[in-house]
Image (tube, rainbow, N blue to C red):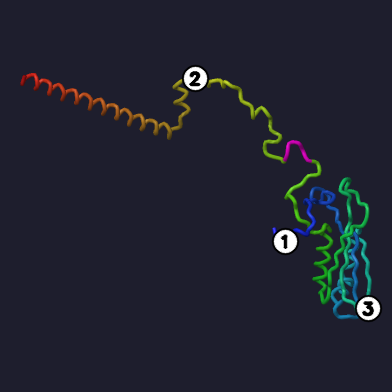
Amino acid sequence: MSNSHLFLKSGFPRAPLQNGIGRVVLQLQRITFKFCKNHGASRGIREFLETDLIDFSKNNPGIVVYVKPRRHRSPNLTVEYRKYSKVTNSRIEMNGERQVINCHNFSREEVSKWVTLLRTQSGNPTIRYRKLWHTDSPSIQGPWTPFTNRRPELNLAQFPREKPPPVHPTEIRTSISPSSAAELNTTSALANYATEAGQYKGVEAKKIKRKESKKLNSQG
């Protein structure tokens, strides 16, 4: 974290009036258009007022619009947002958050984009997040997990555990797939071959020992 973040107010991410879950309530309360009637730097904002202001007011009846002409002054947009209490989320007064956008030499399209952006903002100041998630009513269960609402019997085990019932060989054969059966046949054939080879070697060794013992007896 850089040193510049140390001077920011800390807080948690929150949405006023639960915006994004149900009906969205725009937080913009008042917008003021300040411009000059004659200066060329106010041309874009004058075109916006002549063509788009009436439609903007009709589409947003909850936003108070002020038009304030000023002679030989740079044009700007001044917006103010609502303020809600943290407990009941009820509107109590105008928010202290004000934004002033300098519209010097802006075109009509640029003014329209800035008005749309300011209309959809929450008005909350920039803060340093303490955590990436927050809830106003914390639960004793902690954060939600895939096992939060599962039955507790799934986490219990009885000791000593019961042994599984015996399975008949025919049931084992029926439950084996053809591929696994072929593998079992090959492994069993190799095992039988190994045992037979071992038995053959043992018989040959016994025969050799008998011959040697006979030779010794005949020589003695």
Apparent side of residue 12 relative to residue 180 in the rendered image (left or right): right
Q: Quadrant of the C terminus?
A: top left
| Majority SS type along the magenta span | loop
Apparent side of residue 212 relative to residue 121 in the rendered image (left or right): left
Q: Amino acid at mark 1?
A: Asn
Q: Quadrant of the N terminus?
A: bottom right
Q: Earlier in the sequence, mark 3 or mark 1?
A: 1
The quarter holding residue 157 reads: top right
Q: Which residue is mark 1?
A: 3
Name the mark nearer the viewer: 3 or 1: 1
Say which of 16 and 110 sits in front. 16
Apparent side of residue 178 relative to residue 102 in the rendered image (left or right): left
Taking the view exactly as shown, the residue that stands out farthest to the left is 219
Above or below: residue 2 compared with residue 109: above
* Rendered location of residue 161, percent (x, y): 57, 22
Q: CA distance from mark 3 to mark 2?
A: 99 Å
Q: Which residue is mark 2?
A: 166
Name the mark nearer the viewer: 2 or 1: 1
What is the secondary structure assignment of the residue under circle 1?
helix
Q: Amino acid at mark 2?
A: Pro
10 Å neighbourhood of mark 1: few (<14), some, or many (≥20)? few
* Rendered location of residue 169, percent (x, y): 44, 22
Above or below: residue 122 compared with residue 45: above
